[in-house]
Amino acid sequence: MHTSSQKAGETLLAQALESRRDICKTLLTTSSAALGVYLTLLGLVLDKGKAICFLSCHPVVASVPVVLFIFAASMYVCGYFHAPAVSAERVLAALRSENEAIILGGVSATLKRRFYFLWAGNSAFWCGVCSGLYSVVVAARGA
């Protein structure tokens, strides 16, 4: 392989690993903030009497967005880290023995792991947004 092609491939690989990690980090903050926004919106829509009635009459409607936002945040945390099989000791041993298969397998496992956890987190996040909006509308209509 030509040296410039190899360098370009290394750069693309490093960017792919870091971009998904940065996305997970950003979305972890976003889903944590969404939890606060949802609870604040409920607080603005409901006065104290209506809040008690809403929570007792619609406990599932009120709690589903909270659970989904927490689940999304946990998926982003899982996606932030490398695959468990990719430990620093194992990578160093592979570099010393010049075993490319271990390194390539670790990179592939990490990319797949981040992809799946990002999709799981995004699915939970957007379901949380939709159910949160529904919950706020139900609350605004009079519990």
Image: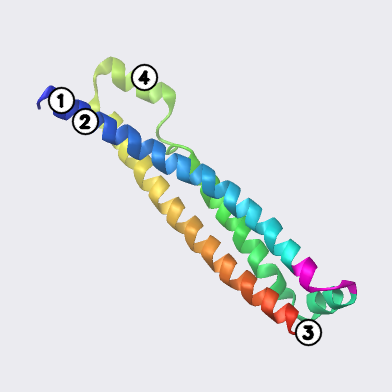
Q: State which quadrant residue 106 falls in.
A: top left
Assign a secondary structure to mark 4: helix
At label 2, counting other C-alpha atoms closer than 10 Å, the crowd grade (few under 14, some 14-19, many 20 or more) is few
Does residue 107 show up magenta in the picture? Answer: no
Q: Is the residue under label 1 in contact with that under label 2 (CB below 8 Å)? A: yes
Q: Is residue 51 above or below residue 114?
A: below
**Mark closer to the chain start, 3 or 1:** 1
Image-based side of 60 in relation to 93, left or right: right
Look at label 3 and name its amino acid: Gly
Assign a secondary structure to mark 3: loop
Image spot of residue 73 (x, y percent)? 58, 51
Image-based side of 4 in relation to 138, left or right: left
Q: Work out whether residue 54 or residue 136 is closer to the camera in this orientation and state it.
A: 136
Q: Work out whether residue 92 or residue 3 is closer to the camera in this orientation and state it.
A: 3
Residue located at (58% from left, 66% from top): 129
Instruction: Give the CA separation, mark 3 to mark 1.
Output: 65 Å
Segment colored magenta: 42-48
Q: Which residue position holds label 2? A: 8
Q: Work out whether residue 98 or residue 64 is closer to the camera in this orientation and state it.
A: 64
**Mark closer to the chain start, 3 or 2:** 2
Q: Which residue position holds label 4? A: 92
Q: Quadrant of the C terminus?
A: bottom right
Q: Choose mark 4 or mark 2, whichever is in front.
A: 2
**Mark closer to the chain start, 4 or 2:** 2
Q: Which residue position holds label 1? A: 4
Q: Choose mark 1 or mark 4, whichever is in front.
A: 1
Look at label 4 and name its amino acid: Leu
